[in-house]
Image: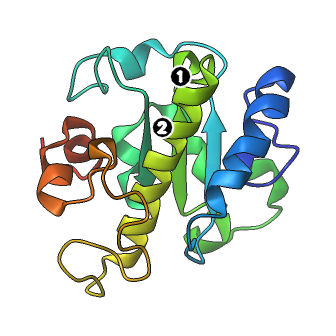
Amino acid sequence: MERTDKGWYFDYSVTNENTLKPLCVEVEKHFTLPARRLLRYFAASDDFQLRQEPPVGFGTYYRGFHVPLSGRHSLPMHLQSVFFHPLEQFTEVVSFDVMVAFDNLIYIRDSTCSDVTGCVTNYAHELQHFVQQSSTDGRSRGGQPEGQMGVLSGCPIFHQLQSARSNCSICRKVQGKN
């Protein structure tokens, strides 16, 4: 996978990059992003494996997802590999930590990318998962990450309550709670 802009991958779709990236960059301004390496992957073609029903995939109606490095094993091999630097760049044996290029992946489905409003809304939703996952290592209060209380409050899509998040089938799959 060739990435021209570290942290952003548009699956060779110049149209998606030119249309979606500026909007998603604007969305990020409304978040305090953690100091973790995030790959934002905007698919340009359908992925049959991801459309399979759990536990193999996310089901027919998924729009996108967030996965930390530790959850990569629930993904197809081609998506597991995006977390790492290409092996060809190493001329000697290196540690696992050196091989890791990204700590987290936000994946937006191809059909979601075709609707700008849906894509940007879903990106904000997955970005909220990224922020929550990164800040809930014993530093949250009431299921809300510190510094992000109510960022997207009032919108049920964003799973603001921890109980709603735990009932989301996609979240359960990524967290290994099928």
Q: In the rendered image, which quarter contains the C terminus? A: top left
Residue at 67% across, 19% down: 44
The reply to whether residue 84 is in sight is no
Is residue 122 something that shows in the picture? yes
Identity of the residue drawn at 19% across and 45% down:
172
Residue 168 tag number: none
Mark 2 — residue? 122
Q: Quadrant of residue 21?
A: top right
Choose between 26 and 81: the one closer to the eye: 26
Can you identify the residue that label 1 sits on? 112
**Residue 35 appears at what percent x and percent y?**
60, 78
Count of labels shown? 2
Side of 88 relative to 97 (left or right): right
Q: Secondary structure at mark 2?
A: helix
The three-letter code of the residue at mark 2 reads Asn
Q: In the rendering, at what x and y percent does residue 110 appear? A: 58, 19
Residue at the spot x=63%, y=26% of the render? Answer: 116
Disc 2 packing (10 Å; few <14; some 14–19; many ≥20): many
Residue 70: quarter of image: bottom left
In the displayed image of the protein, which residue is found farthest to the front? Answer: 154
Q: Position of residue 147 (x, y in %)?
A: 44, 81
In this rendering, is residue 58 above or below 143?
above
Which quadrant is home to the N terminus? top right
Determine contact: label 2, label 1, CB under 8 Å. Answer: yes
Q: Residues within 10 Å of mark 1 (few under 14, many from 20)?
A: many
| Residue at 85% across, 32% down | 18
Q: Secondary structure at mark 1?
A: helix
Query: How far from the left and from the top, in percent, is residue 68?
Result: 43, 58
Taking 98 as reference, is 127 above or below it?
Answer: above
Identity of the amino acid at label 1? Thr
Q: Which one is nearer the viewer's eye here, 103 or 107? A: 107
